[in-house]
Image: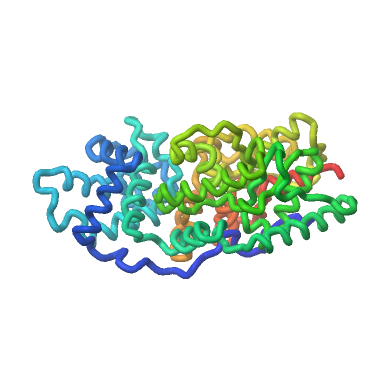
Amino acid sequence: MDKSIENEGPLEENPPAGPTEGSLSSSSTEQRDKMFKALKEDPDGQHAYLMKNACVHCGLCADSCHYYLSSGDPELIPAVKAEKLSRALRKEASPFGRKKDLLGSEQREALFKAAFQDCSLCGRCTLSCPVGLSTRRAMYAARTMFSSIEDLPPGLDGPVQTALEVGNYIDMSTEDFVENIEWIAEEVGEEIEIEDLSVPIDKEGAEWLYIPHPLEARDYPMLLMAVVKILHAAGEDYTFSSHAYDTANYAFYQGNRENTRRIVKRVLEGKQKLGAKGIVQSPCGHGYRVMRWEAEGLLGESLDFPVLTMSQMLDRYIREGRIQLIKDAVEGPFTYHDPCNIGRLGGVIEEPRRVMNAVTSQFVEMEPHGVWNLCCGGGGGLAATADYGQKRVQAGKAKADQIRETGAKIVVTNCYNCMTQVRELNKAYELGIEVKSIVELVADSMKT
């Protein structure tokens, strides 16, 4: 198995850059009405209304934001970003609120930039707020406003439309997916010396439905090979689905709850068709967050089955003795980057650390880590939009400094966007590291 994907290209595709038409122009009365209607109906919009007069401007959120830490620009302090929305809300609520400049071109441009470019929705600032306000929620509400008039960055528009029309955001046909899984089965079978290794597709009644990232099947098959190798070694009862094979859900980053719900429903349809008992998702921060923590609210009903990210399965297999590892089979030292949507916002913090300590005696924590871990800068959909590439690398300087201080040779993480971003930080800041998926590391450490 290929030991590293360090020299490969970005894991996420960057569609053509450029703002959508009208994104920098003033809003018509009809557009403004749509935007504020969407805001009032959105749960995060309610929090935004709460914030408009509640922020005490203490500045404690400043040092929690990787944008501000990396640049020192006061415009990037979370409270200042939230104020761009709060100012419009205060105007709207005033007796003279319905005036022409309620959301004029300058205000609209500033809010669009704050919501989509200058905030990765990582949520770290909320931990610092003495009154519990969330700039993440305010900026998500702002995204909802722009989504209501279909004014979005290209990287959050085209891929979502493709996902809604085709079933996955990279426009991969079912035939190609099935053929690639069959080829992966052959490759893994040769590696572990099992002739005619079967990798189940559309197996009914399996314990787990594994939802891959489509780029695993198309561009980075060594990562899906690692998954198959581990699931086989653990004796897992699992299956892939030919109907649902995309864990990503970029509609979430649009701020469009209806599109997000439709993509969630496709995954649930795949599970229902096969009667699987639970869902395991490929390492994808927002994909896990949406399915585990957002889906019930989007659907208006409880999910009566478990939803896990793959690092949780790895931890279970190791603790139960279902896979055997050779400690220090891969030379370190290592550090682990907590994806915001899996760690701070997803609650999966101890499991990957148990995995890391099982595979290596050279595990060095970043400081801070866990809930307080710094965002890498690639979340919030920024890794999907080429226009924001330079900005997110600049905003990742604080993370690059954090990585350098560990002295680690290999950075391990559990999210594709994080892998993309950390690899780019490696090049930009000459960190001299490799970047690995936690799944790849475990597969490379298993006894054969």
User: Which quarter of the picture shows residue 42?
Assistant: top left
436, above or below 327, in the image: below
246 and 141: which one is in front? 246
Question: Can you give x and y, in whole percent of width and height, for residue 18 in the image?
Answer: 40, 69
The residue sitting at 29% across, 65% down in the picture is 24
- Specify whether 64 is left or right of 281: left
Please tell me in which quadrant of the rendered image residue 423 appears. Answer: bottom right
Q: Quadrant of the N terminus?
A: bottom right
**Residue 366 percent coordinates (x, y):** 58, 41
Assign the C terminus to one quadrant of the image: top right
- Whether residue 62 appears in this view of the structure is no
Relative image position of residue 219 (x, y in whole percent): 66, 62
Q: Give percent across and percent down for residue 416.
A: 59, 52
In this rendering, the answer to whether 54 lies above or below 36 is above
In this rendering, position of residue 69 left or right of residue 423: left
Query: Which is more toward the observer, 42 or 155?
Result: 42
- Residue at the location (76% across, 43% down)? 231
Above/below status of 94 relative to 429: above
Which residue appears at 9% of the width and 44% of the height?
95
Q: Is residue 164 visible?
A: yes
